[in-house]
Image (tube, coloured by chain):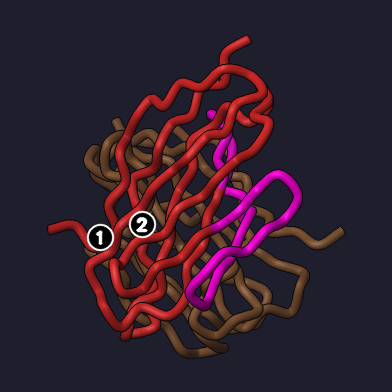
Amino acid sequence: QKEVEQNSGPLSVPEGAIASLNCTYSDRGSQSFFWYRQYSGKSPELIMSIYSNGDKEDGRFTAQLNKASQYVSLLIRDSQPSDSATYLCAVTGTASKLTFGTGTRLQVTL
Amino acid sequence: EAQVTQNPRYLITVTGKKLTVTCSQNMNHEYMSWYRQDPGLGLRQIYYSMNVEVTDKGDVPEGYKVSRKEKRNFPLILESPSPNQTSLYFCASSIRREGGEQFFGPGTRLTVL
C-alpha cells in the first residue's frame, strides 16, 4: 500500500463547477497535511496546509481533513481554466518525514 | 525576493562524469531537501537536511551525495551519473523543521547519456 494515494485523473470539470480532489494516507499517526499545485513544467507550489480535523477555507480553496478515515481532500469552488494543473497531496508522518502522493491532474474545461 | 535557486536549469551529460547541482535559499530556512520527479512515480525525496552539517537519507539516496556546510546552500552531487538518474530534480526549503511547508526551486532537468 502506498503511503499517500491519489487518483491520477485526469479529473475534468466545467468552468465554474466545484472540483473535488481526494487523498488517503496510511500512517495513522500523521499530523500535517498539505496540498501543492504544479503546473506542467513548473515546480510545486504550496496552496493549503491543514493540521486538525475539519475544514479550512482560503479563498476558493477548502481543505478537509478526517483523521479517523485517514482522508484529506481539496475543494476548488468556481473552477477556472487557470486551475488546470496537477495537485499533489503531501503528508508528514510519525517520523516527521514528508511524503508526496503522485498527484491528480485537473482539467477545467470551457 | 524570497526564493530557492538552482543551477544549472538544464544539463545533458554522459555516464560517469561527476556533476554538482547547486541549490541556494535566501529565507534563512533550517530545512532543505532534494527530490527527483519521474512520470508515474511522483516526487521522491533523495536527501534532506534539518540544519547545518546535518543530513539524512530520503527514499532514494543511492547514487547521490549532499553536503550542508552553510545554512543557505545544499548542493546535490552525482559522483558517477548513470542513465537511470535522468530526471527532473527539485530543491526545496522550509522554515518548519519537519519540512512541511516547502518552497521549491525551479527545477533542474538532467539527462545522462
Residue B8 % position (x, y): 59, 44
Q: Colour of chain B?
A: brown
**Hey, which residue is sitting farthest top in the picture?**
A110
Using the image, determine if residue A30 lies above or below residue A72: below
Give the Cα distance between marks 2 and 1: 6 Å
Label 1 Cα crowd, 10 Å radius (few <14 / some 14-19 / many 20+): some
Q: Is residue B13 above or below residue A35?
A: above
Residue at 36% x, 53% y is: A23
Residue A41 belongs to the span the image colors magenta: yes
Position of residue B20 in the picture relative to residue B82 (left or right): right
Amino acid type at image mark 1: Gly
Quick one: B107 or B82, which is closer to the camera? Answer: B107
Q: Residues at badges 2 and 1 in contact (C-beta under 8 Å)?
A: yes
Q: Can residue B105 be seen in this view?
A: no
Residue with the mark numbered 1: B63
Q: In this view, does B7 lie to the left or right of A106?
A: right
Q: Where residue A32 is drawn, which disc sits there?
A: none
Chain in red (letter): A
Provide residue A9's location: percent of width, then percent of height.
Answer: 35, 29
* Residue A18 in picture, x, y percent from top left: 57, 33
Q: Which of A95 and A62 is in front in this view?
A: A62
Question: Hey, which quadrant is residue B78 in on the image?
Answer: bottom left
B106 or A19, which is in the foreground?
A19
Residue, disc 2: B78
**Residue type, numbered disc 2:** Leu
Q: Do labels 2 and 1 share a chain?
A: yes
Pointer 2 or 1: first along the chain: 1
Is A58 magenta? The answer is yes
What range is drawn magenta here?
Answer: A37-63
